[in-house]
Image: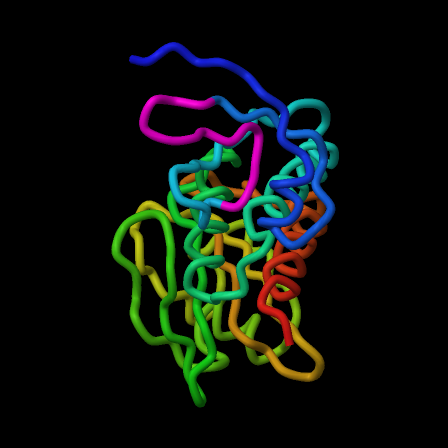
Amino acid sequence: MAALRMVEVVDVISEWCGRRARHWSIAIRENGFRLLPGGSPTIGGMSFDITELSGGRAEQYRQLREQAESLLAGETDRVANSANLAALIFHALPDLNWAGFYFTRGAELVVGPFQGKPACVRIAWGRGVCGAAAASGETQVVPDVHAFPGHIACDADSRSEIVIPLRRGGAVLGVLDLDSPKPGRFDEVDRAGLEELAAVFVASLGD
């Protein structure tokens, strides 16, 4: 592996991302770049590093939100941003077996980018946890999926679930869905933190 040398890049990264950047360090390799701790992965030769979260759980979500903002900066494509955010959440948060998106299409939710086992492709509004979140426009926190009326078992390993609607104006664009093999995995701290991440995603799509 080629030796690394560290340089600070501020103004150039700021221009590339279309936003005011913090001081980031960039390691230059023989065949490209590796951006630390975050930046736009759309720039050729750069890859995003997930920074280990620290502190209390609310603080960890604050750090995760900052990483998400850096990861999505400068990109408005829905598929690209949902794919990257699903990967970030799945690898940053413990005890998950599925993390991803469903998007509204007519009276259904259609699966989007995700991390985990293959998922149900289409879910009717009002059906299951995802459909309930979409239809109500409210986050659904389910400690025991087997006790939820009409639960759709896409992954038999899932024991608890949280689904956050992606709201813009009066419309629900889809949902952010997280499953866990642990009963009672999600609580109000997760609700608040994940609702902020959902808002970051929606804001990244532009007008």
Indicate left or right for 154 with 179 as reference.
left
Front-lying residue, 19 or 198:
19
Q: Quadrant of residue 113?
A: bottom left
Front residue of this view, candidates 114 and 80: 80
- Seen as rendered, the residue at the extreme top is 3
User: From what the image shows, is residue 186 above or below residue 119?
Assistant: above
Nearest the viewer among 85 and 127 is 85
As drawn, the residue found furthest toward the left would be 118
Magenta stretch: give its range. Answer: 28-40
Quadrant of the image containing the N terminus: top left
33 in magenta: yes
Give how far across and how far down residue 35 sits, in percent: 51, 31
Residue at 36% in and 48% down: 115
- Above/below status of 28 relative to 85: above
Name the residue located 31 percent from the left edge and 53 percent from the top edge.
155
The quadrant of the rendering that contains the C terminus is bottom right
Residue drawn at 72 percent across, 51 percent down: 192
The image position of residue 136, as x and y in percent, is: 62, 77
Q: Position of residue 23 (x, y in %)?
A: 70, 30
Q: Is residue 111 above or below residue 190?
A: below
Q: Is residue 178 left or right of residue 59?
A: left
Residue 200 belongs to the span the image colors magenta: no
